[in-house]
Amino acid sequence: MKKQTKLALLVGVMSVAGAMTSFAATGWQQENGTWVYYDKNEEKVSQKWQKSGDYWYYLDDLGDMAKDSLIDDGNATYYVDANGVMVRNQWVAVPNTNDYDKDEPDQWWYYFGDNGKAYKRNESSSSDVSLKTINGKKYAFDVDGKMLFGWVSQGERLTDQDAWKNAKYYFGDANDGAMTTGWREIMVHDDNARTMEEQPNIDYWDTDQVRWFYFNASGKKEVKSLGKTINGKKYGFDEDGRMIASWYTEATPSTAVPKSQRAEYSESFMYFSTPEDGAKSTRGWFKVIPGYFLNKGKWEEDGSAWYYADGKGHLVANEIKTINGKKYAFDDKGGMMSGLVLLEMKQLPSGKYSTTEFVDNLGKSSKKIPYETQENIEESIGKIHYSEFLSGKYRMMYFGDGKDGSQKYGKQSIKLDDENRTFYFKEAGSNRGAGFNGIRDDKLYIGGLNIKADKYDKYEVVVVDKSNDNQLVFKGTVGELLNMPGYVSSVEETEKKTTWHITTPNSNYQVKLLSNAGVVLKSGTKRDGEDYKIRVNNKVVTTVTLE
């Protein structure tokens, strides 16, 4: 706004003198270099306004015409310029005689309306601010008429270090006190800011901070909001009104969250971009370095990861989520997973297992069931009983090579120790994407991996349910099968050999012979590592002989 330090209206000394014509004993008189006024009783007027032409003048307690000063008259305050003329519809800067206070300005601004009275706050007002519109902008004044600036609450300037916390309105600086609306960057001091040990390398959480605030059209700052839409983007503001930047959680930040609580903890995180931008990542992908309290290990590596925020801006964690028609998996720290993963699915109240939520990732870098190499992947799968694959408790899945991350289906060639191994992931049904368990194209798959018989056993028997997509029922040695009830129909013994005739306890079951090449034998007789001779006819084991 345009303001003037001291007004010099176009009323020169000569014009004033012309307007103030001297008479013998009444009216305006010049005495001792100043103007005075005598009434009709020839008495000098004091502490009173007197008009001359179009202008008003004030006679002080000595009867002298006041100049360049504030005039308190009853409850009103006026100002007369260097020529003594009452100022109207003007800003005036008055030197501050109390400027030894570092929180006060060198001068105070006043605004005098059409009647010459300074705009003031009503002493009986209970509102936070009393606004006056001047030249299209809104201003606030205290009960003495001084223009308020900075943080304002209950009609007063707040100047202590917590002013930004306690006040709702901000009125610019000492020379432009217009009420702030929209964005404004303001320096604040926060003794409760997190230390570097609590949140390393987050400099905008230092004690002295330059932070963005947003003031609505009413002038009130936005507070305690995690989804404020501004110009089509979502922003967050803390309880004191600071724009939230980078990673944010309403949970208690910690680097030691129990594994059972980690997914829920990670889902509380939201990402609000940089301190210069602050726009929230909402319902979409973004790739950034995780926060210190979200994934300390990756943060220390300065490594980035892909994340996905739901419609409210919260991370997706420990979940397989459909995004634009494709499925993606996110670990318990919210990072997108890729490659081969072995998941322990969440058990539902019904006793069944979820197809989208999981409780553990037993895959890469896991000490529980590692499978980063070809040698230990079969051993790792072996630690899980095949029945737990069949129940859906465990699922082997494949989420691409890291460039894509979307779930893959059907036959896949995955490199392990520089050797390509064949996997098959179901292409339809409720278990779509899960590693297949059973026989397909004369090959046995467990957890999706094409399984081979143990090289020492040479051959192993497998039982599949032909009525259920050849799902696996049993896998083991010939000796184990012979000791299972319902799988031997009769036994023939001679001095030289014993022959077991093989059957099944269920008409839908079939017993097949698996080689250490991972292929189901079609027909013929083979000898395993324990010297059992297994006869196969049309891919079904018919007899076992030990000589």
Image: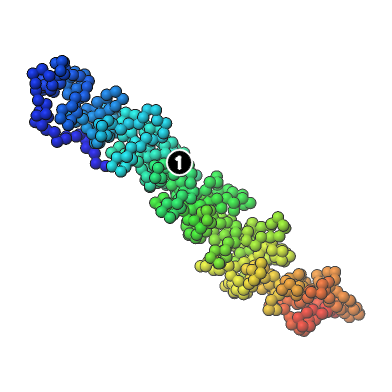
Element at label 1: loop
Residue 402 at x, y percent in the picture: 53, 66
Residue for point 39% across, 42% down: 219
Residue for point 42% across, 51% down: 230
Based on the displayed image, in which of its 4 quarters is residue 340 positioned?
bottom right
> How many numbered marks, from 0 up?
1
Residue 331 at x, y percent in the picture: 58, 58
Residue 23 at x, y percent in the picture: 9, 21
Decide which of 248, 7 is in the foreground and name it.
Answer: 7
In the picture of the structure, the residue carrying the numbered disc 1 is: 240
Q: In this view, does 336 lie above or below 424?
A: above
Residue 499 at x, y percent in the picture: 86, 78
State left or right for residue 334 relative to residue 118.
Answer: right
State left or right for residue 274 relative to residue 545.
Answer: left
- Give the position of the N terminus as an image quadrant: top left
State left or right for residue 291 relative to residue 417.
Answer: left
